[in-house]
């Protein structure tokens, strides 16, 4: 397959033809006999700045907004909702028979806090351990390991400081070419994030159904009647969290399902204009 590489000559550029050897039938021509254009499989994919920024925004929404903002507000309002309560009681004794609150589900609020904040801590620790294991597995096979391990870890922000030539994701290369252990292909970081989103979504729905920690404030300000019972300023953080968690969950599931096809088969991306015309 012929393609071209760009070389700089003083202040101008020119194209030099280059011939790439096809390793097997998986890599097809960019233009088929019927005029279809294909994007070749992303073997040795280079992570771009736009991909990094997109991921930064996703994690900011997930953890800075959902976990810390909603988690802190639930903790503060759950403590304020019970006159004799302390932070220790909210976190460790809310689900005991001693604290049965009529206004709201004290236990559901406590579980939501643990799910948001505790779940995030567990996610960061677990995926960091997996990233360390991935680092040593890549080193064992003789690859530059730091970038790929960091990119598939919660510390991916450090990847921004790598030069473009070192931003190759080794896991984008089919395993038959690199021979890594099979567990490296299980997309553990995406599955972990999807499970975290699913658990938090269930806990939020449970808290909304049984009464949130802000129930006393909602009743005191007359927001417990009509449509205000379901839409008021105190419930907006819950709805925002649900939106972000469900969006991230859907994205992780779709990425896991589509990743194999995108990595191993060319993707149809367009058609040559003369092939579209009839009777040619």
Image: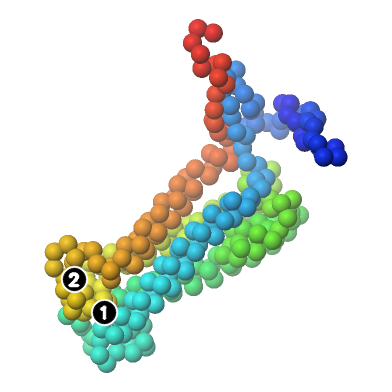
Q: Callout 1 environment at 10 Å: few (<14), some (14 to 19), or many (20+)?
A: many
Q: Position of residue 253 (x, y in %)?
A: 44, 50
Which x, y percent locates residue 130?
Answer: 58, 64
* Relative image position of residue 30 (x, y in whole percent): 63, 27
In the rendering, at what x and y percent does residue 23 appear? Answer: 71, 33
Q: Quadrant of residue 266?
A: top right
Farthest residue to the right: give it.
Answer: 10
Left or right for 127, reference 103: right
The quadrant in which residue 82 appears is: bottom left
Q: Is residue 265 above or below residue 279?
A: below
**Disc 2 from disc 1: Cα separation:** 20 Å
Residue displayed at 21% across by 64% down: 230
- Please, what secondary structure does the residue beneath circle 1 have? helix
Residue at left 24%, top 67%?
A: 232
Q: Image quadrant for the C terminus?
A: top right
Residue occupying image coordinates x 68% and y 31%: 24
Indicate the quadrant where residue 14 lies. Answer: top right
Q: Which mark is residue 44?
A: none
The residue that disc 2 covers is: 223
The residue pinned by badge 1 equals: 106
Local secondary structure at mark 2:
loop
**Residue 185 position (above or below residue 38):** below
Closer to the camera in the image, 3 or 217: 217
Quarter of the N terminus within the rendering: top right
Residue 25 in view: yes
Q: Which of 156/80 is in front?
A: 80
């Amino acid at each position: 397959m012929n393609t071209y590489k760009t070389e700089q000559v003083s202040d101008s550029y020119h194209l030099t033809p280059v011939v790439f050897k096809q390793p097997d039938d998986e890599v097809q021509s960019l233009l088929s006999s019927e005029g279809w254009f294909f994007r070749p499989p992303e073997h040795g994919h280079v992570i771009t700045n736009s991909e990094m920024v997109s991921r930064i925004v996703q994690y900011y929404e997930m953890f800075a907004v959902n976990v810390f903002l909603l988690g802190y507000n639930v903790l503060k309002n759950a403590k304020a909702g019970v006159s004799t309560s302390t932070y220790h009681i909210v976190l460790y004794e809310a689900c005991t028979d001693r604290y049965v609150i009529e206004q709201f589900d004290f236990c559901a609020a406590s579980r939501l806090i643990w799910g948001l904040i505790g779940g995030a801590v567990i996610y960061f620790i677990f995926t960091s351990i997996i990233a360390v294991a991935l680092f040593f597995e890549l080193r064992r096979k003789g690859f530059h390991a730091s970038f790929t391990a960091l990119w598939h870890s919660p510390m991916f922000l450090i990847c921004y400081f790598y030069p473009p030539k070192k931003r190759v994701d080794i896991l984008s290369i089919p395993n038959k070419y690199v021979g890594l252990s099979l567990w490296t292909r299980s997309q553990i970081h995406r599955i972990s994030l999807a499970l975290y989103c699913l658990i938090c979504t269930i806990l939020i729905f449970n808290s909304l159904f049984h009464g949130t920690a802000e129930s006393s404030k909602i009743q005191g300000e007359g927001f417990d009647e009509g449509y205000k019972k379901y839409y008021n300023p105190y419930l907006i953080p819950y709805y925002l969290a649900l939106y972000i968690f469900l969006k991230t969950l859907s994205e992780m599931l779709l990425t896991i399902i589509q990743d194999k096809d995108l990595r191993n088969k060319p993707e149809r991306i367009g058609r040559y204009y003369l092939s579209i015309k009839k009777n040619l």
